Image (cartoon, helix red, strand yellow):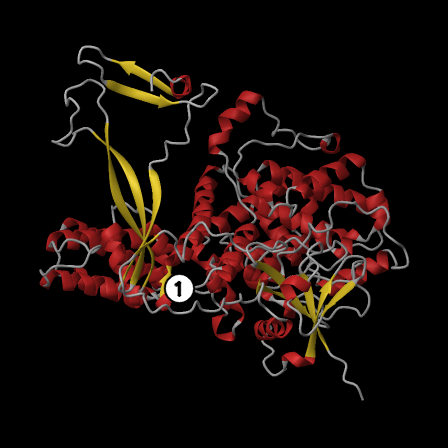
Amino acid sequence: MFGDPELRANFSLELDMSWGIVLRAYRSLTPEGKEDNGNKNPLQEWGEEIEDGAIYGVTLRRVRTETPPEDNLAVPSCPGYVHYKTCKVRSLRAGTLQKLVENLLVEYQGTDTAYVPTFLSTYRSFTTPQKVLELLLDRRLEKVGNEETLPPGSPVPDVLRVQRVIRGILQTWLETHPQDFLDTPQCLHLISSYLTHDSRETANHLLHLVQSLEEEGKQDVTLQEWKLSTQPSEHNKESAEASGNIPELLSYPSQEVAEQLTLIDVDLFQRLQTCHCLGSIWSQRDKKENRHVAPSVRATVAQFNAVTACVTASVLNDIQLRPQQRAKVLEKWIGIAQHCRFLRNFSSLRAILSALQSNSIYRLKRTWASVSRDNLMVFHKLSAIFSDENNHEMSREILNKDEIPLRRTHSARNEPRPLRRSASQVHSARPTQGTVPYLGTFLTDLIMLDTALPDFVEGGLINFEKRRKEHEVLAKIQKLQLTCRHYVLTRKPEFIQSFYAHRQLTEDQSYRISRTIEPPADSCPNSPRIRRKLTKRFSSLLLGSEVFGPKLNGERVSPSGSCSSCEIDEGLIAALIPAESASSQNFTEPLTPPATPIRDDLSRPVSSPRSPVSPSCALPVYNQQIADLCIIRVSMENTHGNLYKSILLTSQDKSRVVIQRALHKHNIESCQPDDFQMVQILSEGKELTIPDSANVYYAMNTSANFDFVLRRRVKES
């Protein structure tokens, strides 16, 4: 090999002649002479092992060891000697509930470090805290009295070790997810009974945690608790309004308004329970018995809507304002939005932009014509952050950066300038910069995961690989929650009072006032020509379409002829409607994918190179056909145009099947699929009617948005 120039180019050898010719180390090089990092991956996917009640993914891991095997021919004392051994590592991909709970004991401080946090973050999707706790404690008792041989993957039947592991799991659970026990107080009694006869110091610490949660649980846990502690009471509001001491909201400097909105958003975001964001949980909120489901997400949505309503009302409140005066109000909010961007408060930033892009404000052509060019430029740049291109790639990238990308422009010359920093100051501030994200981005990902991946795999086993993917999204939220500790801002109660005392307008009221200010006969050539897919209000994400009154007939049809606003299913927050559409949106349950056929060979342990729950499979997304799958949005015609459901579409689905799914998701069980026809909404007011016997996947127009409506057939007399 040493005479081959090709091989010489690929290896770098160091020779130690004191022991003869001994290979001390080598580096794999590319043909260009650079170090090749492609062969350094210590992991290799090997396949699967299927046991009774569980499917394990098997990975081969290369581990470095200092002690060579006895039969190794290399000289043990040779300097620079490096030996690697290959270890077989298993990770649970699917299993019964009992297997998932048992695996907590195996993986606590084990090789799969993500298993325990993933389970604790997502188990509410498929079971209850009480059931998990009962299985965990029963498993411990089983180990104490059972010394017989255990199947592979089970913990060693060491009584003390099992007790120690269970106490560790309980402590992690109590500390990281206390709300689970506040919601189910009976779980605290189970833990107390378990720890009663344990005198160890760790048990005393756990008892202290339990007692603290019991005290906290005596208070009523309702949606009211998620309101800000600084929000003024109704009595204080009335007294302040009567005395006339509430200052105008826009009388505050732009930077101060942005800071106070950021403080409110930080408070809510830090209180957010990430498990409430799971699609399978958030989708249940519309049911009457689940009005208190996911209160932390509801509170975030309510605040988003409050900001949007405040912006809309401040622009439209005074119908006597001239266009130039109203343009100053728009410029004020653009300045506030810019400061929100400096503060990395993307929640209020998105709320302000949504209001400015709502139909009621967007259509005011004379007002927008009076907005300065510099402010319009800032508005364009801020709006581009939430572009839906490449699955909102820009907003995702910005969340991972710490710099302040937008420079001050002439439009902000009259604003205070404390945010201008030198390069060294900005660099030093980066590690401690807080971020409040737009929650809709994460809800979108979680809804898509919940829609695209089945809850169960072969044999009715819980698909834990799906939970791992959900935990990846939740972990990003938790990481951003930690950054919020770096905000150092001063709360001003008088601003909070002004904000919550501000006049609120319904969508219908806003549009009527807008038509009064500028009659509908005028076109809107001077409205800002940004991407019209930007704006969607977070609004009826929480409250649903019942918040707004019926729309004016024929007044708000978008230029494309599509629905006036799109409703996202299950918390799915998409900024994908025309700008001249109304800005409300609702969320509904996800489609549950059809169950995978049960395999009859599940009980036999086998190894397979391909996994039915492989994490590498491509996931279907909206507006793209991937691996014979895609996600479409289906709304009902004549339902105010603001409610749609996401449907998982395969290459085998006929029109009747898709219509039946859509009716089910819209809770219209009394109608038959044959009573409707499926129509795809195209651009420029065009439509594509899908034939009754057609395969929707191939019949649809893939160059247009995957937006459909169900239209009731006209019965021939």
The answer to whether one can see residue 638 in this image is: yes
Give 376 or 224, whichever is nearer the viewer.
376
Which residue: 33% across, 16% down?
2
Q: Is residue 537 left or right of residue 401?
A: right
Residue 695 % position (x, y)? 64, 67
Residue 287 % position (x, y)? 52, 73
Q: Is residue 133 left or right of residue 202?
A: right
Whether residue 616 is situated above or below residue 286 in the rendered picture:
above
The answer to whether one can see residue 170 in this image is: no
Outermost right residue: 521
Which residue: 75% across, 33% down?
411
Quadrant of the image for the C terminus? bottom right
Give 635 or 429, whichever is nearer the viewer.
635
The crowding category of the residue bearing disc 1, from other C-alpha atoms within 10 Å (few below 14, some 14 to 19, many at least 20), is many
Outermost front residue: 3
Disc 1 target residue: 457
Residue 67 % position (x, y)? 16, 29
Quadrant of the image for the N terminus? top left
Which residue: 62% across, 32% down?
405
Look at label 1 and name its amino acid: Val
